[in-house]
């Protein structure tokens, strides 16, 4: 008798944030990611309640929109959690930081520090391209996704069905990571991210982005301003740091102090520990030249936040968080945001509802976590250092796969997932669908 397999989208469908997918396969309930909506409030912040107890959880990567709710899941269900070692360590740092931000803004979370620490006993190490048997009939294999350190695509296989969940993926090499694996074998069902899935979404070349970024910073330095770069601590901060280091070393950018604040330093230590996950070029630099470019003398770790703010000369401050939802960036936004000489460089996707998105949309009155209102007159610019594939790259990824019969487009704003799914049907002649939150589908 053939068993029915189902998939339930508990979050991250027609939205960005709280990605959570429950897959019932061969009497096994598998939870793929379980994140929070970083910019969300109330019931939209967390995934829907689990319709069934998950037996196993698998994490694609550590970003909070994919892993932020994991401590609550482990606390309630005590299930095994499969993830790469970098994902385990990075998620712990991000969860601790989330608790700290929640305390500062008097926000209640559904877990405590002890729940974050308890995750260690549930984690099981996973490595790229090494199959793991989840039971007698179901196999898990992780593949490189190119998004952040330790990020993975998740492939679940039975004798009759293979499902690939991309998590977040990048189809171009970055300064630190190689792009997503494209040799992943046969795939019947594809669950793919659509952050930049609209036909109008096309990333400029990385070289062009870097040049525009450096040009804007140089212009700000010349007018005597300071530059605030709110950056995601994992992935984006390291790309920005290496870009600045490269241009300063080549004298294409004026040599001004670069201050590093927030948990970026802790994450940089993990990049050193897990150097073998990085691109061959940077691996060789760390392994043989004994030089970690993330520990360059050009970077100053902030000990006193008043120092970069009060200095009269220009400087660059790289600080968490990337969407201005908390962390030290709040202090710098308050202190530097009211000066039109200064520049705020947003470096990645800004979820609707976040302060970063509001600034990007032209809002000037911004409310801080304390409830205080500030007026931002500093220049605000977005530089596309994205670690997500754009629509042409997503199509290119699909073209590498063999045997795809159905595609679920998730992790994108509604207009993007709908546009992407329609174009897959039209251009690839593959059945494609953009599910809604709460929808259950029989496979």
Image (cartoon, rainbow, N blue to C red):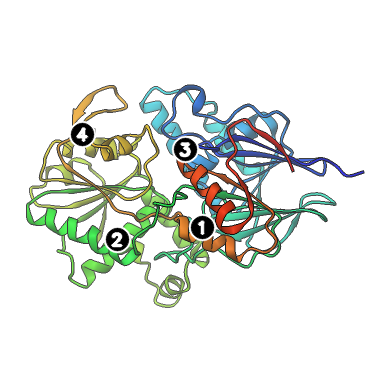
Q: What residue is rendered at 49% in x and 46% in y?
A: 419
Position of residue 102 relative to residue 295, above or below, is above
Extreme residue in the right direction: 1
**Mark 2 sits on what residue?**
209
Whole-angstrom CA distance, mark 1 to mark 3, is 33 Å
Q: Which numbered mark, 2 or 1, is in the foreground of this view?
A: 1
Disc with the residue nearer the chain's start (2 vs 3): 3
**Mark 4 sits on what residue?**
334
Q: Which numbered mark, 2 or 3, is in the foreground of this view?
A: 2
Q: Please tell me whether mark 4 sits on a helix, a strand or a loop.
A: helix
Position of residue 401 relative to residue 90, above or below, is below
Disc with the residue nearer the chain's start (4 vs 3): 3
Judge whether residue 121 can be spotted in this image.
Answer: yes
Extreme residue in the bottom direction: 288
Disc with the residue nearer the chain's start (4 vs 2): 2
Position of residue 263 relative to residue 430, above or below, is above
Circles 4 and 2 in contact, beta carbons < 8 Å:
no
Q: Which numbered mark, 4 or 2, is in the foreground of this view?
A: 2
Q: Toward the viewer: 107 or 442? A: 442
**Mark 1 sits on what residue?**
394
Q: Toward the viewer: 123 or 41? A: 41
**Mark 3 sits on what residue?**
96
Disc with the residue nearer the chain's start (1 vs 3): 3
Judge whether residue 296 can be spotted in this image.
Answer: no
Disc with the residue nearer the chain's start (1 vs 4): 4
- Image coordinates of residue 420 in percent, x first then y, are 51, 49
Whole-angstrom CA distance, mark 2 to mark 3, is 32 Å
Q: How many marks?
A: 4
Disc with the residue nearer the chain's start (2 vs 1): 2
């Amino acid at each position: 008798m053939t068993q029915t397999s189902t998939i339930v989208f508990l979050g991250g469908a027609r939205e960005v944030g709280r990605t959570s997918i429950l897959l019932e396969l061969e009497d096994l309930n598998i939870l793929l990611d379980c994140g929070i909506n970083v910019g969300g409030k109330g019931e939209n912040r967390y995934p829907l309640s689990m319709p069934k107890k998950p037996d196993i959880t698998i994490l694609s990567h550590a970003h909070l929109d994919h892993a932020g709710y994991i401590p609550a899941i482990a606390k309630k269900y005590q299930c095994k959690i499969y993830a790469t070692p970098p994902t385990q360590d990075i998620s712990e740092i991000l969860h601790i930081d989330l608790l700290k931000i929640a305390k500062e803004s008097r926000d209640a979370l559904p877990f405590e520090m002890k729940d974050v620490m308890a995750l260690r006993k549930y984690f099981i190490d996973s490595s790229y391209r090494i199959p793991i048997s989840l039971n007698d009939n179901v196999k898990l294999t992780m593949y490189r996704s190119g998004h952040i350190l330790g990020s993975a695509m998740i492939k679940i296989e039975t004798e009759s069905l293979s499902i690939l969940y991309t998590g977040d993926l990048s189809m171009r090499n970055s300064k630190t990571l190689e792009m997503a694996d494209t040799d992943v074998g046969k795939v019947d069902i594809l669950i793919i991210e659509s952050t930049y899935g609209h036909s109008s979404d096309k990333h400029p070349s990385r070289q062009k982005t870097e040049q525009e970024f450096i040009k804007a910073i140089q212009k700000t330095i010349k007018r005597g301003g300071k530059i605030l770069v709110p950056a995601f601590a994992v992935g984006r901060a390291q790309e920005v740091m290496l870009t600045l280091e490269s241009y300063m070393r080549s004298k294409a950018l004026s040599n001004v102090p670069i201050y590093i604040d927030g948990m970026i330093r802790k994450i940089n230590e993990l990049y050193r520990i897990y150097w073998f996950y990085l691109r061959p070029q940077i691996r060789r630099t760390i392994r043989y030249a004994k030089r970690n470019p993330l520990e360059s003398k050009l970077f100053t770790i902030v000990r006193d936040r008043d120092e970069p703010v009060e200095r009269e000369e220009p400087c660059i401050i790289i600080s968490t968080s990337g969407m201005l939802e908390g962390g030290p960036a709040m202090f710098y936004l308050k202190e530097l945001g009211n000066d039109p000489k200064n520049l705020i460089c947003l470096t990645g996707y800004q979820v609707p509802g976040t302060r970063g998105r509001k600034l990007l949309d032209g809002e000037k009155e911004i409310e801080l976590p304390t409830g205080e209102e500030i007026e931002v007159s500093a220049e605000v610019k977005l530089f596309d250092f994205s670690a997500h594939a754009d629509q042409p790259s997503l199509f290119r990824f699909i073209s590498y796969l063999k045997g795809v019969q159905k595609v679920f487009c998730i992790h994108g704003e509604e207009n993007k997932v709908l546009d992407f799914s329609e174009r897959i049907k039209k251009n690839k002649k593959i059945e494609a669908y953009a599910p809604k939150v709460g929808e259950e589908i029989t496979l």
